[in-house]
Amino acid sequence: MTKADFLRALEDSLEIDEGTLDGAQVLEDLECWDSMSALIYMALADEQLHVAVTGDQIVSCKTVNDLLGIVGDKLTG
Amino acid sequence: MMINPMDMTGRVTVVTGASSGIGRAASLLLSQLGARVVLVGRNQDRLSQTLAMLEGSQHSIEVFDLTSTDDIPAWMKLVAQRNGLISGVVHCAGEQLIFPVRMLKSQQVEELLRINVVSAIMLAKSFRQHGVNDSGGAIVFVSSVMGEVGAPGRSAYCASKGALHSLTKSLAMELAKERIRVNCVAPGTVKTEMLDEAQNLLTDAQIAEIESMQPLGFGTPRDIAHALVFLLAETGRWITGSVLIVDGGYTAH
């Protein structure tokens, strides 16, 4: 899966407008980002990329790019 | 003369989910109280580890996958033939699911209900068969406080545990005339392998918050085993259709 496709899937799961995320966004600045969003990200990573992401990995992330870094090995492009 | 109202000497007791956590602790306590324990699980090696911990040599292992729900009645008859008439069943096997409802797929929910609810119904149906129980007996399900309260990301899991609570009451009514008691223990957060799995999904701060919600802190599998055996033994003789919450005070808030 490409990084762009994964971002679109994340936008879809978070129910935010397509094109909102390019990776640079700071998580705490995103209105939609909360503890449930973190669970949604884990579910998406598991479902789409078969990667088990832990809660502590997400806590250490400041930006969307940091989130993508957790699953980076599985993304192309 | 000293008496032990929780004495289980010679009683054949089937424990599902016996390869770890609460099921393993219940098996150990039952063996210490003299029961003949039948350990049920999917993994022979892990069941053998439990077997090696038990007191006495009268116990046995039954490798069986409880998700094969239609096969449970015939299998239970074989268990009784191999081990003797069964006095009690402790159903500890189950799965948890922490998943946001917007991401849930029906297949996930159906799989969860199969192991957490359908297997319980089929175990009760099987236990009441002629030639299986010892002219009555006791069934104890293990549910969760999540059958009484809600939590984000746990809707399917909560539904499965709430179903066990209503199942307990209905089975108690239906099986009383057959001298079969049916009860349920609803644990709070207990230090088991299942908690380890949940910890991977939650942050340290979230885990600390959950622990702070339990005035007595996290429980141990042994704490739950005590409640399970209390309901199985003579101490539970006049108790049926009950859900015993054992949660360190979690639901007292």
Image (cartoon, coloured by chain):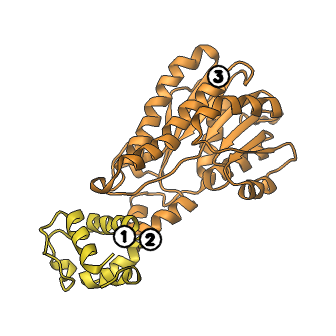
Chain colours: A yellow, B orange
Which residue is located at x 62 percent, y 22 percent? B180
In the rendered view, tell whether residue B245 sits above or below residue A16: above
Q: Quadrant of residue B127?
A: top right
In the rendered view, tell whether residue B61 sits above or below residue A27: above
Which residue is located at x 51 percent, y 27 percent? B241
What is the x, y in percent for residue B203? 39, 72
Label 3 vs label 2: CA separation? 42 Å
Q: Please report contact status of discs 2 and 1: CB closer than 8 Å, yes or no.
A: yes
Local packing at callout 1 (Cα closer than 10 Å; few below 14, some 14-19, many 20+) is many
What is the x, y in percent for residue A65? 27, 84
What is the x, y in percent for residue B220? 58, 57
Q: Nearer the viewer, residue B181 or A28?
A: A28
Q: What type is the residue that disc 1 sits on?
A: Ala
Q: Nearer the viewer, residue B43 or B148?
A: B43
Q: What type is the residue that disc 3 sits on?
A: Arg
Q: Earlier in the sequence, mark 2 or mark 1?
A: 1
Q: Residue furthest top?
A: B177
Q: Residue furthest right?
A: B57
Label 1 vs label 3: CA separation? 44 Å
Instruction: Using the image, name the chain to which the residue with label 2 belongs.
Output: A
Q: What type is the residue that disc 2 sits on?
A: Ala
Name the residue carrying label 1.
A45
Name the residue carrying label 3.
B128
